[in-house]
Amino acid sequence: MKILVEIPDNKAALALEFFKSISFIKKARPVARNEITNPAILKGIEDYESKKIKPTIVNLTQLKKIINA
């Protein structure tokens, strides 16, 4: 399971140290505001850039499914 927690920049180091000290947390790392972390979106971008797929029209329902994957 992944949980996104937004923390003020001036408390980030303390929060990261805290999360890393908890035994059941597998990985803790900061994520840039403009970083894409959704694997479905990343795969789509990579496939498009490598010309494996061509752009298609996507309706709003399909787009929501992609984003929430």
Image (spheres, rainbow, N blue to C red):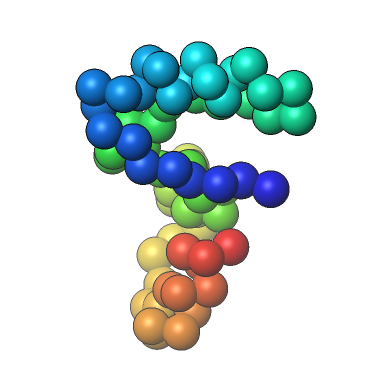
Position of residue 65 measured from the top left corner of the image (x, y, whole percent): 53, 73
Q: How many marks?
A: 0
Residue 19, percent from left and from top: 56, 25
Of the 4 image quadrants, the one containing the C terminus is: bottom right
Residue 57 in which image quadrant: bottom left
Asked if residue 24 lies left or right of residue 62, the reply is right
Left or right: residue 9 compared with residue 7? left
Q: Which of these two is toward me, 17 or 40?
A: 17
Q: Nearer the viewer, residue 35 or 41?
A: 35
Residue extending farthest to the right is 24
Quadrant in the rendering for residue 8: top left
Q: Is residue 27 visible?
A: yes
Q: From the viewer's perspective, is residue 23 above or below residue 33?
A: above
Q: Which residue shows up at 25% across the image and 26% down it?
A: 9
Q: Say whether residue 49 is visible.
A: no
Q: Nearer the viewer, residue 37 or 52?
A: 37
Q: Residue at x 38, y 83 (%)?
A: 60
In this view, 57 is above or below 50 = below
What x and y, as percent, mark residue 18? 53, 20
Q: Is residue 59 above or below residue 10?
A: below
Q: Choose between 57 and 12: the one closer to the eye.
A: 12
Residue 32 image position (x, y, % from top left): 32, 31
- Determine whether, in the image, residue 1 is placed left or right of residue 54: right
Residue shown at 40% from the left, 31% from the top: 31
